[in-house]
Image (spheres, rainbow, N blue to C red):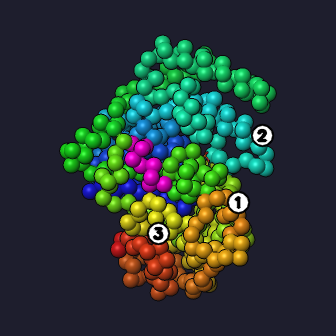
Amino acid sequence: MNSCVIGLQWGDEGKGKIVDILAENSDIVVRYSGGANAGHTVVVGDTKFKLHLLPSGSVRPGTTCVIANGVAVDPQVLLEEIETLGQQDITLNGRLFISGNAHLVMDYHKKEDQLREESLGKNKLGTTVRGIGPCYSDKVGRSYAVRMDDLADLENLKVKLQAIVDYKNKVFSALYDAVPISADELFDKCKVYSEKLSPFRTNTTQFLHKAIADGKSILFEGAQGSLLDLDHGTFPFVTSSNSSSLGMPAGCGVPAKTVDKFIGVIKAYTTRVGAGPFPAEQDNDIGQYIRDRGQEYGTTTGRPRRCGWFDAVPVSYAITIGAIDCIALMHLDTLSGLKELNICKAYEIDGEQTRFFPTNAAQLSRATAVYETVPGWEEEITEVSDFNDLPENAQNYVCRVEEMTGKPVTMIGVGPKRSQTIFR
Ligand code: GDP
Ligand code: IMO
Ligand code: MG
């Protein structure tokens, strides 16, 4: 059985928790897109792991972890993550495999991300400043790209880095009047990356196909959310990779039909970090209530997340483009205490109602949410483990989400811990 976990909103839906739970019955967990812009939280007992590049299965000692070709690997962040797990006696030796084709996020990518965002002022995208856009730009541009495989040939890499840094410094100086970076210092860092990461480097496409032939169970871990997909999200307020399930085959060289089940993860409400239209946003007491109860602050950047009502319009769209089979509905506990809940069931755009999600940012910014109001529930539900023990209104809310999205809710999150999950 192979599964793929996909965020159906603007990221941070709780993918890390779901992947960690499903990893118990998986042999291999694969990250295939995005980079250290992702922040996937896994809570084990009293320990909270915040993973940016390592698959969320990595906290389980017996799980094999793959970082496939589609990931933008920041070697510095990755080494820090491996070290942090090591301090907790969790070793990745012998069970982490990184694609030689994966592109590397270099210091100049992060600098470029930061300088560009700063120069855009109020028009900035609100990126995580993790160098993601510049790294993927260099991947598409090809001439100045550095991949994991380049770490195997330091002599060539030295020459290559000098040419790239010369070019980047010209750009930094001309566009931003910024201080240049040193090719020598960068190369010294790369020598360390080469030494420490080379043992993990392999052909992950070949590795995964062998695993499939051997009947291993594989769990594919999506990063970001479908609405941040470069081609199918709310452009330009998106990330620079295909973060819907459409990115999975290209990101790891395994056809989508290998996946038996695509599991979409949503929150019982909606959040978004960074700029861009958000029709169901509640920039008011309701939004603050959700932010406080749900601890809605970015896992990677610490930024307060924008919060709003559950919006069935984009979720239905993400289900359609992603061939999603079932839903994990997270953070139901966060909604306790609200007298009434709104669910966005359609948009009104230019005087017309539609249930179709417009990804054009200008059009989406003209959309007004059309709500259906349902009764809330007072009780705390963080200890509930059986669906039938949920307050009736909470049960009805889950059923309404199912009706609106047309997909069964098979898992419900009632808290951050593994045990705080209701299976149906
Ligand atoms: P991801 O990026 O999709 O993995 O999600 P994040 O880790 O960035 O953000 C989700 C946050 O919600 C984390 O702090 C999780 O520990 C937490 N979380 C996950 N599921 C639940 C849930 O059902 N209830 C509550 N209260 N917190 C949850
Ligand atoms: P996980 O995997 C939430 C958002 C940023 C910004 C936009 C572009 O934890 O769900 P980027 O740095 O990618 O160029 O930023 O995308 N973004 C995320 N938002 N969760 C994430 O990942 C995100 N990764 C990127 O906030 O709006
Ligand atoms: Mg996150």
Q: Mark 1 highlights which residue?
A: 362
Q: Residue 66, percent across and down?
A: 37, 41
The quarter of the image holding the N terminus is bottom left
The quarter of the image holding the C terminus is bottom left
Separation (CA) of disc 3 from disc 2: 38 Å
* Tag shown at residue 119: 2
**Does any atom of ligand 2 lie closer than 8 Å to the CB of label 1?**
no
* Quadrant in which residue 297 is drawn: bottom right
Disc 2 marks which amino acid?
Ser
**Does any atom of ligand 2 lie closer than 8 Å to the CB of label 2?**
no
The residue sitting at 45% across, 28% down in the picture is: 148
User: Start and end of the magenta stretch?
Assistant: 244-252
Q: On the rendered structure, is 132 left or right of 41?
A: right
Along the viewing direction, whichever of 59 and 220 lies nearer the viewer: 220
Q: Is residue 91 above or below residue 385?
A: above
Q: Mark 3 highlights which residue?
A: 329
The residue sitting at 76% across, 41% down in the picture is: 118
Of circles 3 and 1, the one toward us is 1
The disc, 3 or 1, on the residue closer to the chain's N-terminal end is 3
Separation (CA) of disc 3 from disc 1: 29 Å
* Marks 2 & 1, CB-CB < 8 Å contact: no
The disc, 3 or 2, on the residue closer to the chain's N-terminal end is 2
Helix, strand, or loop for circle 3? Answer: strand
Is 250 inside the magenta-drawn segment?
yes
Along the viewing direction, whichever of 11 and 25 lies nearer the viewer: 11
